[in-house]
Image (tube, grey):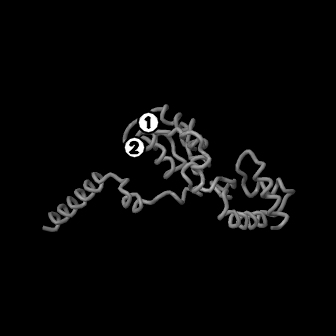
Amino acid sequence: MTDLERAIEAALFAAEEPMTVEALAGFLGDAANADVRDALKSLAEMYSERGVHLVERGKRWHFETAPDLAHLLRKEKEQVRRLSRAATEVLAIIAYHEPVSRAEIESIRGVQTSGGTLDVLMEAGWVKIAGRREVPGRPTIYATTPEFLDHFGLTSRRDLPGIAELKATGLLDPVDDAFEALTDSGDDEEEAEDVA
């Protein structure tokens, strides 16, 4: 193990929050970002078979318990956070379309979104205000947080499942598929009438 790897290991162990490569480089006396990245990858590989893993979530690194051992550390049952259907829909829209305004969320959902729904997601730490859109009225825009990635075990938003994966797991409503097939066959009939 190199001195840089040892220093990074110590810094991450003592840190209260996950750290970016840039923050680690600055903390360690302006080490080169590329060297820090290489050391992090080496440490992550070294820890991959241990009781704790070094992981990257949202471009920030931290140690976490190996998934197969997490049950040993729970002394009491973890309280499950249940989201309403509306909150789940809003969270999915933000995750897939961020940054997104409330009006855009409502346009995608087809119904009004209560301010309380966004408040619940912000209190959970999964959604944050990401600024304002540079259009008339300057609406607030929302985005997901590193805590969202961490909670759902994602390295980045690119790890979100695609349409094919969602269909395969049965998470997409089959009624939508049936409606889409129906509208597609209706288009074919209209084209046949136009030809005749």
What SS does tag 1 mark? loop
* Between 62 and 114, the one nearer to me in the picture: 62
* Between 65 and 75, the one nearer to me in the picture: 75
Q: Label 1 amino acid?
A: Thr
Distance between the alpha carbons at the discs numbered 1 and 2: 8 Å
Judged from this view, the residue extending furthest toward the left is 196
What SS does tag 2 mark? helix
Q: Is residue 132 visible?
A: no
Residue 52 in the figure: left or right of residue 180: right
Q: Label 2 amino acid?
A: Arg
Residue at screen point 76% across, 48% down? 15
Task: Report the disc number at residue 135.
Answer: none
Write down the quadrant of residue 122 in the picture: top right
Image coordinates for residue 107, horizontal then vertical, percent: 41, 43
Dot 1, how many residues are within 10 Å of its Cα: few (below 14), some (14-19), or many (20+)? some
Task: Report the disc number at residue 109.
Answer: 2
* Between 39 and 130, the one nearer to me in the picture: 39
Q: Dots 1 and 2: beta carbons under 8 Å?
A: yes
Residue 176 in the figure: left or right of residue 156: left
Image coordinates for residue 108, horizontal then vertical, percent: 41, 46
Task: Report the disc number at residue 113.
Answer: 1
Is 48 placed above or below 148 here?
below
Residue at screen point 73% across, 52% down? 19
Residue 63 in the figure: left or right of residue 89: right
Residue at screen point 49% across, 52% down? 96
